[in-house]
Amino acid sequence: MTTQPEIVLYRRVRKSPYFHAAARHGVAAYSVTNAQYHPRRYRDPFEEYEALVNDVTLWDVGSERQVEITGPDALAFVDMLTFRDFTTCEVGQCKYALITLPDGGILSDPIVLRLAEDHFWLSTAETPLLSWCQALAYWSEMDVQVRKADVGPVQVQGPKSLDVMVDLFGESLRELKRYWLTRKELDGMSVVISRTGFTNELGYEIYLEDASKNADRFWQKVWEAGQPYGMQVTGPIHVRRIEAGILSYDADMNTDTNPFEVAHAYPWPSEVDKAAFYMGKEALQRIRDAGVERKLVGVKIDGASLGAYIDGSMPEPFPVVRDGREVGQVTSACYSPQVGTNVGLAMLPTELTAVDTPIEVETPYGRRNATVAQVPFVESRASTAQAQVAE
């Protein structure tokens, strides 16, 4: 039996604007995200991890598409999608948002960028969000336009990322605050830069406009700027995001989970009581008042390495066992080089979520002892890096 079947390259799966540029670096494995090929790794995942935490890395994240909302009602429309209060979001600011359904389930978790008073991007890797927004725009009769923008993002992540960004875009990048954005040009190419990322290290996302035309040339410019700092092209490094407690959609949350189950450590669930109507308002208020029966927490798992998560070591959740019966699931897990053991995120009954609670986890290598642990497991080692809590 083939445990790691190949992924076939053919026309029915869409390609990132950076597909060919990124492929020249020797992709070892693709997955499919947002109906597009997505480079997962180029070499050993733990070598890529070391490049991230010590130097700087470049990622093709063109599978994140930008749902563009424009028009006189753009702010009210975005505010209707989520319990986050976007009336407090300034032009030039970004917010992490959970887009909720009428029953409180989570449809998507984009970074929302406010580019102008009536202009937003929802940067997402979840395919349904564009159609959801288009349908809501039609039925709400709000004065908005919803489309998929011709924008392709890359991530530049790691402690030397600021050096690369300053060389590319100038000294003003030193003043860019976490979860804020700025506009720049590079050889006639327009970009939006946000200080965000999927790592909890110092990092940036660069959103290239007219990406279908300029992606190859832009990629090469960023790659060349990174060479003095040891830049490596990598896939998204899930080991670091798990160490940071950063959630991954379809792994740690989906339409069957709600914000109070997965985002209880964040400071903004209180915004469910905002005055404006939003999708899921009544449901989320009921859930808040009644309390949840399960929560997503950190776990430490004993024994030998469970792998790097994106290396085929975790194709399914790991069952969590307590007193001989399955009580939950480990949703993401890997070996952490900095912690020196296996770490992960697990959905557990609330009565088992106290730190140091013992549990057992069924892994592909047998049952392992584990304990509930505090997240993040690892704080950033960069003095100016992002905190774990999303803004």
Image (tube, rainbow, N blue to C red):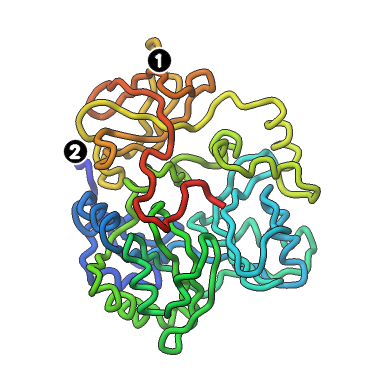
Location of residue 93 (image quadrant): bottom right
Q: Distance between the residues labelled 2 and 1?
A: 32 Å
Q: Which of marks 2 and 1 is in front?
A: 1
Q: Which of marks 2 and 1 is nearer the N terminus?
A: 2
**Residue 119 position by quadrant:** bottom right
Q: What element carries label 1?
A: strand
Q: Compare residues 124 and 226 and report the one nearer the observer.
A: 226
Write the residue at 78% across / 64% down.
142
For residue 376, above or below residue 203? above
As drawn, the residue found furthest toward the bottom would be 188
Residue at x 28%, y 28% (from the top left corner)? 363
Residue 131 pos. (x, y %): 61, 59
Q: Is residue 181 above or below residue 264?
A: below
Residue 144: give x, y in percent of width and height. 73, 69
Say left or right for 259 vs 19: right
Residue indicated by mark 2? 1
* Figure check: 340 above or below 390: above
The residue indicated by pointer 1 is: 322
Q: Which of 355 and 96 is in front in this view?
A: 355
Q: Which residue lies furthest to the top in this view?
A: 323
Residue 40 seen by the camera: yes
Task: Rate crowding at label 2 as few (under 14), some (14 to 19) or many (20 or more) other CA atoms within 10 Å.
Answer: few
Pointer 1 local density, CA inside 10 Å: few below 14, some 14–19, many at least 20: few
| Residue 12 in sight here | no
Would you place residue 158 above or below residue 299 in this image? below
The residue shown at (75%, 42%) is 273
- Under mark 2, the amino acid is Met
What is the quadrant of residue 42 in the picture?
bottom left
Left or right: where 141 falls relative to 258: right
Q: Position of residue 125 (x, y in %)?
A: 48, 57
Q: What residue type is labelled 1?
A: Arg
